[in-house]
Image: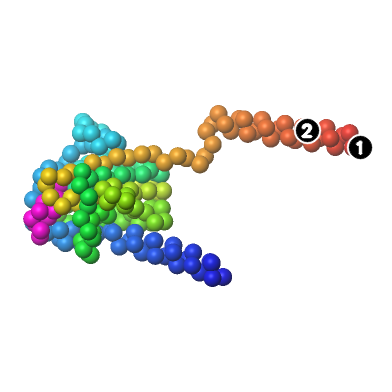
Amino acid sequence: MKICALVFLALAMSGAATAGRVQTDDGDYGEAPTFLYQNECLSINGAVVAPPCAMTGEAFVDSDTETYVVYDFMIDGDRSNFTLALTGTEAFPADDPPRWAYGAFACDLSSDVQCGADPTLQLAVGSPTLSADGMTATFDVTGTNSGATPFVFFAVEPDDSGTVTARITENASSTPEPGSLSLVFGAGLAVVAFGRRRLAKAL
């Protein structure tokens, strides 16, 4: 029972940490963001491309600090079971709640930047995670991003000499490939046939 309680507590704490990184008030990064760029169409590897876009990126100067730069990325289109890695050229600054160094922007009534749906329930337990060097935030989306209400993830660099790139990687599927299904089915038939022959000999 103690083990179950500890596991439950750990899961609850992981979920709470994830939910805490959903920023519903982008005004915490300044009420008048100065955009470095907007509506940048990106591929899954973060390269600037012509539409259709895998992501839409923008960057703005935090008008409270006037030094921090926030990079946010909207996931375009319907997409399921993927990982988004946001990598900075400098380590992300320390969290200063409610100002997070990385997380997701959920819309409120006065959002001035890209925002979307709360992704908490679509993320793996314990996600997002931060690399040991503090330069890569990883969001493991085990659920679905809807093109109609997309997720927007962000990361912050301490000054404008750094930048953040985004990369989407499809997660490995636990569903067998169609070719392997025939092998599994064939093996099953072989086992059944072998069992029948042994039964016939026994009789």
- Crowd around label 2: few <14 · some 14–19 · many ≥20 (10 Å): few
Find out whether residue 57 is within the magenta segment.
no
State left or right for residue 128 relative to residue 156.
right
Q: Earlier in the sequence, mark 2 or mark 1?
A: 2
Tell me where residue 97 sits by quadrant.
bottom left
Badge number at residue 203 = 1
Q: Which type of secondary structure does the marked residue at label 2 adopt? A: helix
Give the percent coordinates (x, y) of residue 71: 19, 48
Q: Nearer the viewer, residue 92 or 171?
A: 92
145 w.r.t. 183: above or below: below
Range shown magenta? 58-69
Q: Is residue 58 visible?
A: no
Query: Which residue is depicted at the point 39% across and 39% down?
Result: 170
**Colour convention:** rainbow
Tell me where residue 107 sits by quadrant.
bottom left
Which residue is labeled 2 in the image? 194
Q: Is residue 172 visible?
A: yes
